[in-house]
C-alpha cells in the first residue's frame, strides 16, 4: 500500500478520539447508571410509568443506548474515512 | 388441530426450509466454506450473527433467569449486548481489514508464532465444544417435551439437520439458514410476549407494558411485583442482592467474553468491506436487542403470573376451581420441572424464599395425600414448599396465557431454530480451526484447495458427531462450564486481539505470557470455586467477593498487565508485523487483497 505516514497518523488519532468518547458513553449507561449509580437513580421514576430509573437503565435503557452508539459510530467513521481519503470506494 | 399436530407441522415446515436453503447455498471453495465467499450483505450478516449468538439458553433460559433473579439478572442483559459495542468499535473493522478466515489466523500472524497459533486453536475448540454441548442438549429437550420422543432421538434428528447444512454448505449454508432461523425465532418469541403483555397490562408492546399498570388492580406492575416479593420473603424484584463489585465484574466478563468468542468474531470476515463489518455489528445488535429487551418484560409477566396463580392455592381438584392450582402446574409437574412438598400439611401451595428441599427433585413412585408426586429429597427447614425450574418460564408462558395451540408449536420451532443456529456456528469454528489453522497453516502448508475443503467437511462431520455425543451424555455441570467459555474468551483472546491492533509495540513474548497468565489464573479460580470449594459458605471465601462468573474480568486485567510489562522488556516485533498493524488500522487498502 502507498505509504502516507502523516495522513494515516492523523486518521488514527482522530479514530482514537471518537472511540474514547463513545466508550465513555458506553461505560456510563451500563456500568454507571445500571450498576454504580443504580440506587440513587432508583429514587427517580420515569414519569408516566412504573419504572425506577436505575432499574430501567439496567434492563432496557443501556441496550437501546448500545444500539445508538454503534449506529452513530458507523456514520461518524464513514465520514472520517472520507475526510482522510481512506474510504474503500 | 391439536398442540402436537401444530408442533409437528411447524417444525417440519421450518426444517424443510433449512434443508432447501442448504442445497441452494452449497459451498464450492474453501472461501465459501470458511467465510461464505466473503460477499454476504451486512443486513443478512447482522441477522445471521443474531441467530448465531442467541442460543437455546437465550431463547428458553434468559427470561426465566431474570424472572427469578430480578435486578440481579441485569448482568446478562447488559453483558450479552454491551459486548457488541466493543466488537463494533475495537475488533470487527480491523479484523475484517486483516482478512483471512479465523481467529487463530490473526493470533498466529500478528504474533509471528506457530505456538501462539496452536494455543489459539485449542482455546477456540475448547470454548466452542463447551458451548455446543448445551445446544445439542437443548434440541433434545425441546423434542422430548413438545413431540414426545426420547431426548436421544431428538439429539439425533438435530445432528442430522446440522450435519446436512454445515457439512454441505459450510459458512455459506450456515449463514443463509441462520437468516431464516432468526426470522423463525424472533417471531416465535414475540408472539406470546405480545399476547401476554396485552393480557396483563393492555399494552401490546412488552417493553412498555412492564412499566405499565396491572389491568386487574390498577397498580404499577413493578410495584405490585415488588410487593408480592416482599410479602413472601424475597428481596424486592427491582433491587438486587448481589454485591456491586460482583455485578460489575460479571457484567464486564460477559461483555468482554462476548467480544472474544470466536464464533461471533468470524462472522465479520464474511462481509466484503471494512465499512460493511462496522454496520453489520450494528444490525446484529439491533436484531439481538429485540429479543433482549423483550426478555425482561416476559420475566416480569411470568413471575407475577406464577406467584398469583400458585401461591396459597389448593392442589386437590375437589376444591373450588378458583382456589386450585392451574392445570399447567400439573402438566409441568409431570415433566419433573415443578415439585411441591406439603410441609405444613394444609393441602395448599406455600411459596416462599429459599429452597424447598436439597438439590433437584428426585421423584419417587406414588402420590401424596393431595395427589401430588412425591420427592425423596431431604426437606429444608424454611417455609417454602415449591420447586420451580427456571426454564419453564418461556415454555409454559403460552399455556399460562391460554394462547392458541399454534403458538405453542411456534415456540417449539423457535427454540429449535435458536439451538440449531448456534450449534452450526460453533461447529464451523471447530472445523475451520482443524482444517485451516492446524492442517493448512501449521502441519501441511502444501495441501491443495480440494484437499483442504475435504478436510473441512470431514472435520465438520466429526465435530457434529462429538457434539451429538455431548448432547446425549451431557457432562456434569454444563452450566458451570459455560462460565469457562466466557472467562476463557475474556482472559485470553480479547486482550491478545485488542493489543494486536492497538499496540504496535506488542510482541510475541508479551502476548503469549499474557494469554498464559490470564487463562491459568481464570481457569484455576473457576475450577477451584466451581468444583473443589463449591459448597455453601464458599461465597465468603471468594476473592473480593467476586464470583467465578465474574473472575474473567480480573483475568483480563492480569493479561493486559503481564503482556505490557513483558513486551517492554523484550525486543519489538519485526518490521513486517509493525507494517501489518499499520495496514489493518486503515480501511482503504482492503480492496487490494484477495
Image (spheres, grey):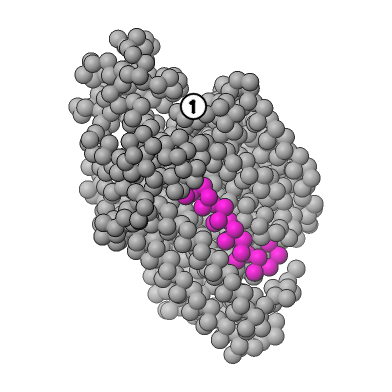
Can residue B69 be seen from the camera position used here?
A: no
Q: Chain of mark 1?
A: B
| Quarter location, residue B305 | top left
Q: What residue do we see at 34% from left, 61% from top?
A: A33
Point out residue B78 in the picture as x, y percentages from the top left corner.
Answer: 42, 55
The answer to whether residue B240 is above or below residue B355 is below
- The front one of B222 and B576 is B222
Q: What residue do we see at 71% from left, 58% from top?
A: B40
Q: Secondary structure at mark 1?
A: loop
Point out residue B118 in the picture as x, y percentages from the top left corner.
Answer: 57, 58
Q: Residue furthest bottom?
A: A6
The answer to whether residue B62 is above or below residue B277 is above
| Quarter location, residue B513 | bottom left
Bounds of the magenta span?
Answer: B271-295
For the C terminus of chain B, the quadrant is bottom right
Residue B192 as seen in the image, left or right of residue B314: right
The answer to whether residue B590 is above or below residue B55 is below
Q: What residue do we see at 57% from left, 61% from top?
A: B282
Q: Specify the principal SS of the magenta part.
A: helix
Point out residue B172 in the picture as x, y percentages from the top left corner.
Answer: 72, 51
Residue A49 as seen in the image, left or right of residue B259: left
Amino acid at each position: 500500500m502507498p505509504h502516507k505516514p502523516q495522513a494515516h497518523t492523523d486518521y488514527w488519532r482522530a479514530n482514537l478520539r471518537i472511540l474514547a468518547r463513545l466508550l465513555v458513553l458506553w461505560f456510563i449507561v451500563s456500568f454507571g447508571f445500571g450498576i454504580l449509580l443504580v440506587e440513587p437513580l432508583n429514587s427517580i421514576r420515569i414519569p408516566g410509568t412504573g419504572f425506577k430509573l436505575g432499574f430501567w437503565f439496567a434492563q432496557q435503557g443501556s441496550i437501546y443506548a448500545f444500539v445508538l452508539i454503534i449506529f452513530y459510530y458507523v456514520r461518524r467513521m464513514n465520514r472520517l474515512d472520507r475526510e482522510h481519503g481512506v474510504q474503500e470506494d | 388441530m391439536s398442540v402436537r399436530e401444530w408442533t409437528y407441522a411447524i417444525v417440519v415446515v421450518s426444517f424443510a426450509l433449512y434443508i432447501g436453503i442448504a442445497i441452494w447455498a452449497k459451498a464450492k471453495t474453501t472461501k465459501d466454506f470458511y467465510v461464505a465467499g466473503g460477499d454476504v450483505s451486512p443486513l443478512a450478516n447482522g441477522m445471521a450473527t443474531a441467530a448465531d449468538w442467541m442460543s437455546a439458553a437465550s431463547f428458553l433460559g434468559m427470561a426465566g433467569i431474570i424472572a427469578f433473579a430480578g435486578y440481579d439478572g441485569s448482568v446478562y442483559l447488559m453483558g450479552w449486548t454491551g459486548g457488541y459495542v466493543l466488537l463494533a468499535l475495537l475488533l470487527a473493522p480491523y479484523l475484517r481489514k486483516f482478512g483471512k478466515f479465523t481467529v487463530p489466523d490473526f493470533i498466529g500472524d500478528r504474533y509471528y508464532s506457530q505456538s501462539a497459533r496452536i494455543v489459539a486453536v485449542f482455546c477456540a475448540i475448547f470454548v466452542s465444544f463447551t458451548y455446543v454441548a448445551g445446544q445439542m442438549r437443548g434440541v433434545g429437550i425441546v423434542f422430548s417435551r413438545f413431540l414426545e420422543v426420547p431426548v436421544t432421538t431428538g439429539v439425533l434428528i438435530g445432528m442430522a439437520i446440522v450435519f446436512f447444512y454445515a457439512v454441505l454448505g459450510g459458512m455459506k449454508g450456515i449463514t443463509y439458514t441462520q437468516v431464516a432461523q432468526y426470522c423463525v425465532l424472533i417471531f416465535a418469541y414475540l408472539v406470546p410476549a405480545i399476547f401476554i403483555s396485552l393480557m396483563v397490562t393492555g399494552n401490546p408492546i412488552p417493553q412498555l407494558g412492564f412499566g405499565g399498570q396491572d389491568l386487574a388492580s390498577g397498580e404499577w406492575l413493578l410495584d405490585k411485583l415488588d410487593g408480592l416479593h416482599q410479602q413472601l420473603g424475597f428481596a424486592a424484584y427491582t433491587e438486587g442482592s448481589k454485591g456491586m463489585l460482583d455485578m460489575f465484574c460479571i457484567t464486564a466478563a460477559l461483555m468482554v467474553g462476548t467480544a472474544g468468542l470466536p464464533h461471533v468474531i468470524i462472522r465479520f470476515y464474511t462481509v466484503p468491506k471494512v465499512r460493511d463489518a462496522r454496520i453489520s455489528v450494528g444490525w446484529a445488535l439491533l436484531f439481538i436487542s429485540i429479543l433482549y429487551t423483550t426478555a425482561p418484560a416476559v420475566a416480569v409477566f411470568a413471575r407475577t403470573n406464577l406467584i398469583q396463580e400458585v401461591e396459597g392455592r389448593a392442589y386437590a381438584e375437589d376444591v373450588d376451581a378458583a382456589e386450585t392450582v392451574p392445570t399447567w402446574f400439573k402438566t409441568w409437574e409431570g415433566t419433573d420441572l415443578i415439585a411441591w412438598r406439603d410441609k405444613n400439611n394444609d393441602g395448599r401451595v406455600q411459596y416462599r424464599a429459599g429452597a424447598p428441599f436439597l438439590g433437584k427433585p428426585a421423584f419417587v413412585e406414588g402420590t401424596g395425600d393431595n395427589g401430588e408426586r412425591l420427592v425423596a429429597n431431604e426437606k429444608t427447614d424454611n417455609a417454602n414448599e415449591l420447586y420451580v425450574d427456571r426454564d419453564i418460564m418461556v415454555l409454559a408462558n403460552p399455556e399460562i396465557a391460554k394462547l392458541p395451540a399454534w403458538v405453542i408449536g411456534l415456540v417449539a420451532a423457535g427454540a429449535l431454530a435458536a439451538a440449531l443456529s448456534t450449534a452450526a456456528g460453533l461447529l464451523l469454528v471447530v472445523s475451520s480451526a482443524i482444517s485451516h489453522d492446524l492442517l493448512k497453516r501449521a502441519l501441511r502448508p502444501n495441501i491443495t484447495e480440494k484437499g483442504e475443503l475435504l478436510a473441512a467437511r470431514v472435520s465438520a462431520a466429526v465435530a457434529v458427531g462429538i457434539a451429538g455425543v455431548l448432547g446425549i451424555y451431557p457432562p456434569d455441570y454444563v452450566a458451570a462450564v459455560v462460565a469457562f467459555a466466557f472467562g476463557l474468551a475474556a482472559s485470553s483472546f480479547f486482550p491478545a486481539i485488542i493489543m494486536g491492533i492497538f499496540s504496535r509495540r506488542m510482541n510475541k513474548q508479551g502476548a503469549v505470557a499474557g494469554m498464559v497468565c490470564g487463562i491459568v489464573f481464570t481457569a484455576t479460580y473457576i475450577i477451584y470455586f466451581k468444583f473443589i470449594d463449591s459448597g455453601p459458605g464458599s461465597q465468603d471465601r471468594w476473592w473480593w467477593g467476586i464470583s467465578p462468573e465474574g473472575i474473567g474480568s480480573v483475568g483480563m486485567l492480569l493479561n493486559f498487565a503481564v503482556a505490557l510489562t513483558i513486551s517492554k522488556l523484550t525486543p519489538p516485533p519485526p518490521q513486517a508485523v509493525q507494517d501489518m498493524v499499520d495496514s489493518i488500522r486503515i480501511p482503504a487498502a482492503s480492496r487490494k487483497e484477495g
